[in-house]
Amino acid sequence: MFTTLKRACFILILFSCSAYAQDVSLYEQFNGRYDFHTIGNTLNVGENGSNINCEILTSSSATLSLEEGTLVEAAYLYWAGSGTGDFDVQLNNTPITASRTFSDALDETRVFFAAFADVTTLVQNTGNGNYTLSNLDLTGVISPYCPTGTNFGGWAIVCVIKNENFPLQQVNVYDGLQHVPNSINIQLNGLNVYDNEAAKIGFLAWEGDAGISVNETLSINSIPVSNNLNPVDNAFNGTNSFTNSSNLYNMDIDYYDLEDFIAIGDTSLSISLTSGQDFVMVNNIVTVLASILPDATVTVNSTLLNCDSRLVQLDFSVWNTDGTAPIPVNTTIDIYADSVLLETLATDSEIAIDESLSFTTLLNIPETIPDNFSLEIVVDETNVIAEIEDNNNSTATEISFMNPPEIVPLTNLEGCDMGYDVAIFNLEEALENTTNTATFNGFYLSETDAELGINEITNSSSYQNTNQPQTIYYRYDNTYCYTIDSFEIKAINCPPNIPQGFSPNNDGINDTFYIENLWNVYNQFSLLIYNRYGYLVYKGNQSTPPWNGIATEGTFKDQPLPTGTYFYVLKLQDELYRNYTGWVYLNK
């Protein structure tokens, strides 16, 4: 490779190069009995440079060989190369499309890409064996890159692995695409190193050259690190620490032990990567540190609200999923409604790694809190307990009280008394012209039935009252709640319906002078009937039967009266109604 060309890039277009890069940052964290293992391979047939044929493979293979009892918790596929990108590849003949992409550049014509895909399921199903990445075709791209030795391609699978025999460790997976010589500095905080044994750091880098060794260093806590494959001044030299290989042309899969660079009790770790000349892109960094700390998170399991109530039953769980130590007893839990503290609880037992503790509490929400509010749960709010991560201790859920629908009350109904204070009512008339928009749920005889939604009045269009007056209950529903109200039905004295004729011929039809709404309604009424000569022939009241055409008074008492017109005087003895006078025709 021509180092003068690369040096010129950094001097002349350093700003442009940086504009393409994406900072390496934490992608995922695992806490427990975890470690990592990386496999991968280059597509270069030799280290790039002007004296090498301009050719590149479209596929290559690597072998995964994990010990018995070791499981793959996560597997992340990275691939990279010259050009703007090939983001559709195959892994063991399975099509893979990048879910995240990265880019970097030397200048406007020499650009580079990297890609990411989560292949956890594929690797878990495949297990140990051969992995072939194919269909990464850069053959039509690399020609302009070969003269300056910037043609490359390759891939790697970073596996986070789990085994019950592993020590408790924190595995952090970082990624991005940053190039050196721009130093990369990463500060890890919130650590509690209780054992520096087995601590290590690994990285995936592209386009490094074994022949360029100008200040290519990896430093931990400002101390340069190295191993047998990676000299202290040539960290990016085409090696694979997992296979002890030195022919991983123009890519590096390496890790370093950290026992001598960290101390028990350390709470932070500083990582820096540098290169004084060689253009190298760092795509992935993994750290493994013994760290014994809990990590509290909280989830809401359910909230139970009742209609027209400000009580909230809250069920939630405090978890220690990512912790490497138990959450201690008496860890505080604060519950807020729109930042107003409602209640403080505490754990009554330790929460082991990957376990949880569930709580149920009944909260009485003050009237000063609006009907729609945020209910927040915060564990260890004052950070009394040292944790892996202090920014994931809370959760919030939105609460909306189940308020009953607002309704316009239904009006009372009156029905004509048919006798003995009984009437027939069409209860549906109470709903006419109502402006209520909630869903009507029926008429009921009691408030309890309305609340339970049982024993609805089924003959609402022809209901006969059983009390005078009688209360009828009704219910309106909205999505979550209901309103119950009532109105009265009452039998009233209506004007009598007086016929103008009858025919007492014993045919069973219209045989008497029967006046509707009179008997058993106006109990004090009197009815006088006269013939055309003005003689009284009938006198009736509540206790007498309707007139059947036989005289009850006068000369012809107890005798049938002849066909003709007769005159009546009806006195209801009711202050609401006048006396009625008129005629009726008796026809035989």
Image: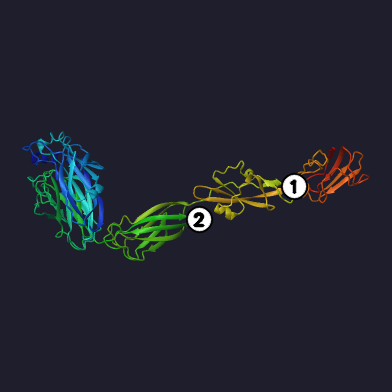
Please identify the residue farthest to the front as the structure is shown. 507
Q: Position of residue 219 (x, y in %)?
A: 15, 53
Secondary structure beneath disc 2?
loop
- Left/right of residue 414 with respect to residue 229 in the rendered view: right
Q: Is residue 570 left or right of residue 358?
A: right
Residue at the spot x=10%, y=54% of the render? 227
Question: As shown in the figure, which amino acid type bears the numbered disc 1?
Answer: Asn
Which numbered disc, 1 or 2, marks the residue closer to the eye? 1
Q: Amino acid at mark 2?
A: Ser
The residue labelled by disc 2 is: 309
Count the numbered circles shown. 2
Q: Position of residue 13 (x, y in %)?
A: 16, 39
The colouring scheme, among rainbow, by chain, secondary structure or one colour, is rainbow
Task: Look at the image and tell me whether residue 25 can be seen.
Answer: no
> Which residue sits at x=58%, y=55%?
448
Q: Where is the N terminus found, in terms of image quarters?
A: top left
Disc sitting over residue 493 in the figure = 1
